[in-house]
Image (cartoon, helix red, strand yellow):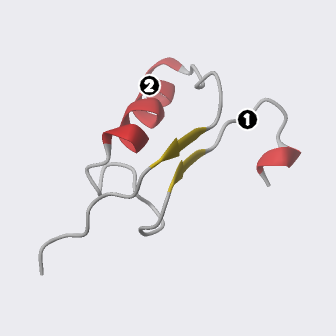
Amino acid sequence: MQQAVRGSRMVLSEGGNHGQFLFDGNSCVDQPVTRYLLTGKLPAADVRCAASPAPDA
């Protein structure tokens, strides 16, 4: 789908659940998404993040 939207960027978190923004505490995901929402500026390239650590059981 990303390829169909010219100029788009993808923020990808390895592993985890769908909908990680602000819920997993992963700053690698949160920072570029927050910046886009506040300023409209996309990252220069796609962003690939390591998975957040699993919560303690």
- Disc 1 marks a residue whose amino acid type is Ser
Q: Quadrant of the C terminus?
A: bottom left
- Secondary structure, mark 1, is loop
Left-right relation of 41 to 6? left
Q: Residues within 10 Å of mark 2 (few under 14, many from 20)?
A: few
> Which x, y percent locates residue 5?
82, 41
- Disc 2 marks a residue whose amino acid type is Arg
Q: Quadrant of the N terminus?
A: bottom right
- Residue 10 sits in quarter: top right
What residue lies at 32% left-to-right and 39% top-to-bottom?
Answer: 27
> Which x, y percent locates residue 30?
37, 40
> Which x, y percent locates residue 18?
48, 66
What residue lies at 44% left-to-right and 25% top-to-bottom?
Answer: 35
Q: Which residue is mark 2?
A: 35
> Which x, y percent locates residue 29?
42, 43
Q: In 3D space, how far apart are the residues under numbered discs 1 and 2 (Cα atoms)? A: 15 Å
- Residue 48 sits in quarter: top right
Q: Is residue 24 above or below residue 10?
A: below
Residue 8: assigned label: 1
Left-right relation of 26 to 10? left
Left-right relation of 50 to 44? left
Q: Residues within 10 Å of mark 1 (few under 14, many from 20)?
A: some
Sequence-wise first label, 1 or 2 = 1
